[in-house]
Amino acid sequence: MLLNFGKYPVVIASSPEMARQFLRVHDSNFASRPALAAGKHIAYNYMDSLWAPYGPHLRQARKIYHSEVFSANRLEEFEPVRAEERRNFLSHLGSLSGKPVLLRAHLSRYTLSSISRVAISNKYFSETEHENSVLELEELQRMLDEWFYLAGAFNIGDWIPWLDFLDLQGYVKRMKHLHKKFDRFNDYVIDDHQARRSEKDFKPKDIADILLGLAEDPNLEVKLTRDSIKALLQDLLLGGSDTTTTTVEWAIHEVLRHPHVMEKAKEELNRVIGRKRWIEENDLPHLPYIDAIIMETFRLHPQATLMAPHCAIEDCNVVGYEIPKGTIVMINAWSIGRNPELWDSPEEFVPERFVGKEIDMFGSNFALFPFGSGRRRCPGYNLGLKIVQSTLANLLHGFDLRLVEGMKVEDVCTEEEYGLTTHPKHSLSIIMIPTLPSHLY
């Protein structure tokens, strides 16, 4: 589908074949991003891995992510941190037994804490104003929510440049205000890490330390500046916390709407794990039905309805269509996931469709590619998937999940709220009753 958004031609790809054309066959020509206001004002002038144009900076950033942040060795090194945070999360939920729990708030706190410990070690945010920290948790969560909203907002000035200076919707003003908040936080984190580097027995213990060390490497193709380090660390906090929270939240919504799915999941967990322990990451390959629930969640509720936009670097011919330089391409993941030619009963939540099948979710199967594909594929997909799998499995294994009194299964929200990522419009409040031996909580 070809549209015109103000000054720019926009192509919407809504089939697996067209997604394959743009993200694999012609990947090198569509690996860049349009220069939108969000990238300028809330991503350090296009320095992060989401909004950076394709070129030496992005290639180096992705190389650093793959070799220093998300490598198999690094993920294994930080597994005890993830396990500790997960246990703390589950214990806290256990202490709330019988009380209404706003699921999104607790998931957000947990995922943010898990990612921040890997990225910046210390918790620079606190639960209350009486603790010594840079930010209160609620304020940081509001900042994250605002970032994702603004990054996905349709800003008129992006598409009609001669109206940009008017900032008709007030988005740019909000972006600049948000950037100041994030920049103060990021400056504090980097200053604190730099101070520790001067200590006698200093050893790198998180991603911030690794990036600051790389900044001193004279052999880097592109020098890592203070702003580029802030952009990459901000990437980790934003991407790692929001997308994992959203996926688990949607999965729980659907499981509660389909009690038979919950029963089958619990049967698998009891059979494989037993009733005397929690699930660990090395258990995950043995839980195919949990995997099927997650894949079905990705299909029915993609993290982004329209994936982050791509931009044609040069004129290009795609299956007979002339695509001029500067054309913006958007992949409609929502439409692909609900295409009746690809999926039986596409509007229904049916994890069984994936059971016993070898399904690739990492960029070669263009009917289901939640992490993108090609040169712009999410570099942190391995970490994100580990957190989603272990979180969902343990919630189903360790708790009896019930709707609050007076709420029916059909009342569970499936309406979507759009931004750069797509959340349930209404947060779900549930009752969580611990079901494992009490000493595990």
Image (cartoon, rainbow, N blue to C red):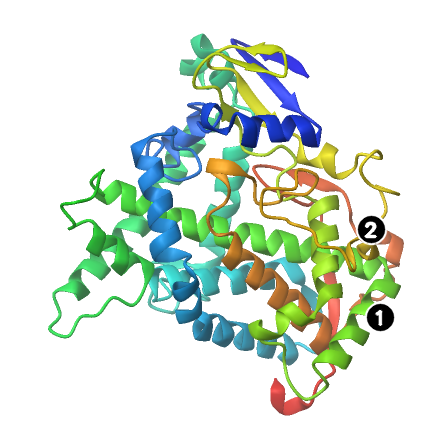
Question: Which of the 4 image quadrants contains residue 322?
Answer: top right
Q: Amino acid at mark 1?
A: Glu
Q: Position of residue 235 (x, y in %)?
A: 41, 46
Indicate the secondary structure of the residue bearing disc 2.
loop
Q: Is 178 left or right of 18, judged from the image as shown?
A: left
For label 2, the crowd category at 10 Å Cα-Cα, with few meaning under 14, some 14 to 19 and many 20 or more, is some
Residue appearing at x 58%, y 76% in the figure = 280
Q: Position of residue 373 (x, y in %)?
A: 55, 39
Residue appearing at x 28%, y 41% in the figure = 228
Residue appearing at x 46%, y 71% in the figure = 79
Q: Amino acid at mark 2?
A: Phe
Q: Position of residue 18 (x, y in %)?
A: 65, 26
Q: Is residue 151 visible?
A: yes
**Rendered image: mark on residue 349:** 2
Residue appearing at x 47%, y 65% in the figure = 114
State the separation of the CA atoms marked 2 and 1.
15 Å
Return the residue nearer the eye: 36 or 387: 387
Instruction: Look at mark 1 in the image and give the residue it sits on.
Output: 263
